[in-house]
Image (cartoon, rainbow, N blue to C red):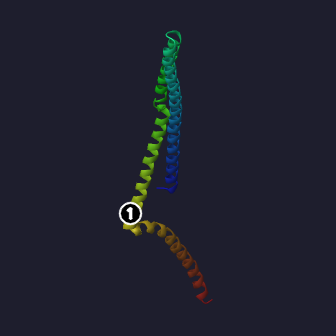
Amino acid sequence: MNSENVVKQLRALWRTDRIIAEIRMRHMLVGLGLRAFAALIAVFGLLMLELSAYFALVQIWSAISAAAILAVANFVIAAVLFVVGGRPPSGRELELATDIHGSAVEALQSEVRALQSQFTGMVQHPLNSVLPLVLVPLITIIVKSLKKSRATAPAAKVMSEPN
């Protein structure tokens, strides 16, 4: 368990969330733009239908058929744009970002579980976690003091012996 791993997983999670949001926002903006354009064409088609009704009242045949044909063509174009604007986003980018997001969440969860188990073990058995940290320096201090006492003992013997 390492805090660097947690930070890496959080960064990966944040980046994939941002990528997913950007992909969805791009798709939503394109779809909204196409739907707005389709609505504009539909309004124009409605205007043409109204114009054709006006011409029907004023004149009987020639202007009516032209306006009606234009209105039907405008409605067909609007329907095609509306269908294109409503299609789902490209699956590869979103699928890849979703997979990376899922793996980052899983790795972060495993890191948190490891941290939790370490913390639980430290709380339940505090000497088990502290003893290895204290034991090595304590052994080196004891070894050094024994070496010093052995080195000073022969020197003390030499000084205490009369010549």
> Residue 11, percent across and down?
53, 49
Apparent side of residue 163 relative to residue 72 in the rendered image (left or right):
right
Decide which of 111, 46 is in the foreground and name it.
46
As displayed, is residue 86 above or below residue 111?
above
Apparent side of residue 141 relative to residue 127 in the rendered image (left or right):
right
Quadrant where the C terminus is found in the figure: bottom right
Q: Amino acid at mark 1?
A: Thr
Mark 1 — residue?
A: 120
Decide which of 62, 141 is in the foreground and name it.
62
> Residue 120, percent across and down?
38, 63
Point out the residue furthest to the front here.
Answer: 58
As displayed, is residue 59 above or below residue 112?
above
Point out the residue furthest to the top here.
Answer: 61
Q: Residue at x 49, y 39 (%)?
A: 97
> Residue 3, percent across and down?
50, 56
Decide which of 45, 142 is in the foreground and name it.
45
Mark 1: secondary structure: helix
As displayed, is residue 136 above or below residue 47?
below
> Residue 28, percent across and down?
50, 36
Tell me the crowding category of disc 1: few under 14, some 14 to 19, or many 20 or more residues within 10 angstroms, Cα based.
Answer: few
Count of numbered circles on the image: 1
Point out the residue furthest to the left here.
Answer: 124
Point out the residue furthest to the right here.
Answer: 163
Q: Residue at x 46, y 66 (%)?
A: 132
Decide which of 161, 30 is in the foreground and name it.
30
As displayed, is residue 115 above or below residue 49?
below
Q: Residue at x 45, y 68 (%)?
A: 130
